[in-house]
């Protein structure tokens, strides 16, 4: 005998669905504002520690914030006006030479292919940087979507940093009393994990990049700067990244001579041994807890979704999602144990 299964949907459930859909649509329409807010929160979180250190040394918080922001601007301006243009020029020459080598060996017409770094727009941008004919804010604006976007992000992050525990106060202000404690605890754990990952990754990348640049320069390998930058960036990918960077450097050196290629191979083997036996064990004591595969996937996905802004937001968002997943699994495990105990 057939039974009729009646599904009743209350008006409250319908309104919840409508409100959720409306909220998602509102977030999508305000996506630029949301990106500004998230970037400001990340910048404030990163700069909180040095500002707190200055405040502990009796420097007023507003003065410490100004000093930290000025130091950050000077460092970024140095990169944009000196290191990055030279790296782009070297990378462009590297691509052209690789194209010539492949053209000779494969006859594929590879050298005639257009590269991103040799496009007229990128060349003009590089020349503008070298000449100093564009302001620092305009550079950032071109990278992330406009000067207004940059100014709004910097102003908001500045106010959050000046206010002691500004991010925590902001989260408490926007979340209801029933959830604010969990949200703050989640933020604190995410902040701690991101801080450990960022410090470890920055330290590894700087050491490996510097050693590669000094060694390649002393050996006289072409494109030492761009090869060193590639070696530092590829530290994001354990094992595979350093191998790829070393193979690329050896390949470039072999175009000069076999002896130079062997010396370059010895250099990268030495850097690899130093990293594996000294640097990584020291850093891994901190147990960063962020899986490199997750970091790589997040960065690639962020770049595809929102370009440079997506890359900047990728790691913090991925770590936050990981923390939420671990929190949910922990609560679920406790409930299961509670049912078994009963």
Image: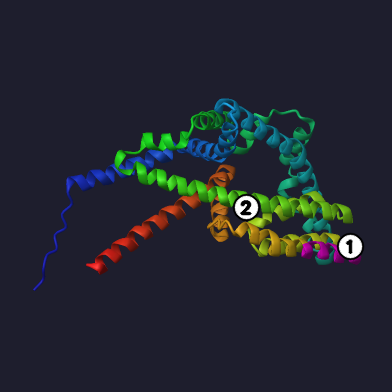
Q: Residues within 10 Å of mark 1 (few under 14, many from 20)?
A: some
Query: Closer to the N terminus: mark 2 or mark 1?
Result: 2
Q: In which quadrant of the rendered view does residue 71 lie?
A: top right
Q: Quadrant of the N terminus?
A: bottom left
Q: In this rendering, does residue 305 appear at all?
A: no
Classify residue 49 as left or right of residue 10.
Answer: right
Q: Nearer the viewer, residue 300 or 184?
A: 184
Residue 110's label in the rendered image is none
- Distance from the alpha carbon under mark 2 to that under mark 1: 32 Å
- Does 96 sit above or below residue 3? above
The nearer-to-camera label among 2 and 1 is 2
Q: Is residue 269 magenta?
A: yes
Q: Quadrant of the C terminus?
A: bottom left
Was residue 22 drawn as part of the magenta stretch in this picture? no
Q: Name the one closer to the observer, 171 or 67.
A: 67
Write the residue at 80% across / 55% down.
Answer: 111
Circle 2 packing at 10 Å, graded few (<14), some (14-19), many (20+), is: some
Nearer-the-camera pick, 52 or 173: 52
Secondary element at image label 1: helix
Where residue 196 appears, x then y in whole percent?
57, 51
Residue that appears at 70% across and 36% down: 75
Q: Residue at x 30, y 66 (%)?
A: 337
Q: Which residue is mark 2?
A: 200
Q: Main secondary structure of the magenta part?
A: helix
Image x and y of residue 52, in percent? 55, 35
Point out the stretch of residues depicted in magenta.
254-270
Q: Which numbered disc covers residue 260?
A: 1
């Amino acid at each position: 005998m057939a039974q009729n299964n009646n599904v009743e949907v209350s008006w409250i459930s319908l309104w919840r669905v409508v409100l959720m859909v409306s909220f998602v649509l509102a977030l999508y329409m305000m996506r630029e504002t949301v990106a500004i807010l998230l970037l400001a929160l990340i910048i404030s979180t990163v700069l909180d520690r040095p500002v707190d250190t200055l405040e502990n040394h009796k420097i007023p918080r507003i003065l410490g914030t100004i000093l930290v922001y000025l130091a950050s601007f000077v460092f970024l301006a140095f990169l944009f006006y000196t290191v990055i243009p030279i790296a782009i020029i070297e990378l462009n020459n590297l691509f052209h030479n690789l194209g010539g080598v492949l053209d000779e060996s494969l006859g594929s017409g590879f050298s005639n292919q257009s590269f991103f770094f040799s496009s007229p727009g990128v060349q003009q941008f590089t020349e503008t940087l070298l000449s100093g004919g564009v302001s620092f804010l305009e550079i950032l604006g071109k990278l992330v979507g406009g000067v207004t976007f940059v100014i709004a992000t910097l102003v908001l992050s500045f106010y959050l940093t000046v206010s002691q525990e500004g991010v925590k106060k902001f989260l408490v202000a926007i979340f209801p009393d029933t959830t604010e404690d969990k949200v703050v605890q989640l933020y604190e754990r995410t902040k701690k994990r991101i801080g450990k990952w960022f410090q470890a990754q920055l330290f590894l990348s700087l050491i490996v990049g510097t050693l590669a640049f000094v060694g390649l320069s002393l050996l006289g390998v072409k494109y030492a700067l761009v090869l060193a930058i590639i070696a530092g960036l590829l530290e994001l990918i354990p094992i595979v990244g350093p191998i790829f960077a070393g193979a690329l450097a050896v390949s470039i050196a072999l175009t000069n001579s076999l002896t130079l290629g062997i010396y370059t191979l010895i250099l990268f083997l030495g850097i690899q041994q130093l990293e594996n036996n000294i640097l990584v064990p020291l850093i891994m004591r901190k147990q960063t807890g962020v899986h490199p595969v997750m970091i790589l996937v997040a960065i690639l996905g962020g770049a595809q979704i929102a370009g440079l802004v997506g890359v900047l937001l990728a790691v913090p968002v991925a770590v936050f999602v990981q923390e939420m997943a671990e929190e949910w699994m922990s609560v679920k495990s406790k409930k299961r144990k509670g049912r078994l105990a009963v």
